[in-house]
């Protein structure tokens, strides 16, 4: 029996750093977007590059294993050198590879990750085999015997398995955590809400939550619902709507602004843990998987789990690579002990 099985993508990532990138901001009445820009037609000098494995299925599996959980992963890879590299990485972290699917029809997923001088990144992704995961690829007997199933973002044809996998987990009392991605959200609200109701934990970033609910975070909004305005009212509306699907805990991550959570009774706000940012890639996967693992460890203590997850995500962004900087629970607790001021804000809201 596994403590957790992850399902998601597996990629070989090429990290590229160049201080020649410019950050261009474009504003409209209600929105502001930032773009990474290079001079058109120019030859750009690269300051640093590296090849590492990545993808939501791999990043979360390796983190779960680093936190001491017996972990397996269901990902689809090509039968070539890139796929072999992914298998090697999983073995290094102690992740069971018996559920990994090999194919000769498609190449392993590949990404080029452009990192800015601010530490943020733009990803150019070739989905490859990641977009072709089918229900027949999944060892359902292994899933049935697992305590938790973690669904990382899926894309392409792979999104078609969401409802059947979630329904299977529900019928066999397997706890489900789901981190929705843009490709899944495009399936539509009606389709996804029927899936979310089976989940113990639902995690999205703010942009994904806005896309799914249709609620935009207005920059000029103010709330009269609290004397202390620690959560934006439009974010509260998102949390309420998403939690109305009957999922037990809904989490919205908001980059530098921290993370918000709602369990149907209490609202939580956890700030970003202090970090010297090198690369933000993998921070979301580290946060989400650490939160789920911490909920197991702390017997459903949401505040402590938010803090643990924030600390581990901060450690990841201080390193170059999505699987660099993982901490054990003991190391997380040691870091928290050095920052007694780091707390979670919460209030009853129903």
Image (tube, helix red, strand yellow):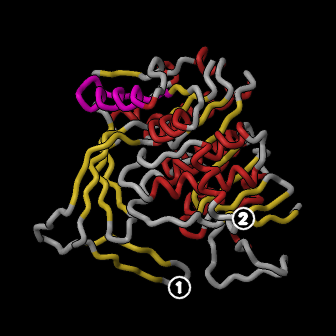
SS at badge 2: loop
Q: Quadrant of the C terminus?
A: bottom right
Report the front residue among 338 and 114: 338
The residue to which callout 2 is attached is 343
Whether residue 87 appears in magenta in the rendering, the answer is: yes
| Residue 154 rendering spot, x and y as whole percentages | 49, 40
In this rendering, does residue 245 appear at all? no
Question: Relative to 240, is 44 on the left or the right?
Answer: left
| Residue 225 rendering spot, x and y as whole percentages | 84, 76
Q: Residue at x 28, y 21 (%)?
A: 104
Report the front residue among 56 and 90: 90
Question: Relative to 59, is 240 on the left or the right?
Answer: right
The residue to which callout 1 is attached is 29
Mark 2 → mark 1, Cα distance in angstroms: 35 Å
Magenta segment, prevailing SS (helix, strand or loop): helix
> Within 10 angstroms of label 2, few (less than 14), some, or many (20 or more) residues?
some
Question: Relative to 262, is 95 on the left or the right?
Answer: left
């Amino acid at each position: 029996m596994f403590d957790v099985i992850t399902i998601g993508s597996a990629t070989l990532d090429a990290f590229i750093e160049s201080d020649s990138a410019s950050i261009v901001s474009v504003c409209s009445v209600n929105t502001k977007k930032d773009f990474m820009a290079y001079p058109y037609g120019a030859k750009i000098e690269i300051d640093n590059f590296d090849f590492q494995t990545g993808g939501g299925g791999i990043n979360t599996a390796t983190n779960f294993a680093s936190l001491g959980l017996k972990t397996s992963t269901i990902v689809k890879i090509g039968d070539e050198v890139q796929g072999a590299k992914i298998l090697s990485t999983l073995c290094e972290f102690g992740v069971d590879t018996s559920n990994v699917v090999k194919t000769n029809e498609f190449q392993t997923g590949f990404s080029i990750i452009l990192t800015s001088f601010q530490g943020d990144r733009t990803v150019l992704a070739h989905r490859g085999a990641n977009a072709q995961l089918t229900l027949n690829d999944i060892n359902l007997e292994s899933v049935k015997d697992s305590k938790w199933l973690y669904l990382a973002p899926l894309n392409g044809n792979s999104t078609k398995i969401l409802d059947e996998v979630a329904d299977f987990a529900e019928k066999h009392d397997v706890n489900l955590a789901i981190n929705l991605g843009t490709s899944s959200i495009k399936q539509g609200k009606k389709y996804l809400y029927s899936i979310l109701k089976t989940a113990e934990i639902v995690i999205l970033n703010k942009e994904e939550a806005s896309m799914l609910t249709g609620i935009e975070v207005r920059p000029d909004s103010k709330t009269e619902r609290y004397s202390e305005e620690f959560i934006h009212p439009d974010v509260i509306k998102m949390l309420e709507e998403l939690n109305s699907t009957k999922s037990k805990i809904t989490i919205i991550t908001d980059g530098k602004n921290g993370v918000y959570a709602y369990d149907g009774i209490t609202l939580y706000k956890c700030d970003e843990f202090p970090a010297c940012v090198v690369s933000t890639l993998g921070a979301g996967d580290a946060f989400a998987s650490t939160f789920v693992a911490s909920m197991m460890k702390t017997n459903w203590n949401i505040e402590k789990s938010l803090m643990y997850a924030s600390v581990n995500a901060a450690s990841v962004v201080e390193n170059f690579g999505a699987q660099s900087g993982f901490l054990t629970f003991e190391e997380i607790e040691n870091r928290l002990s050095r920052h007694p001021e780091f707390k979670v804000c919460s209030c009853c809201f129903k």
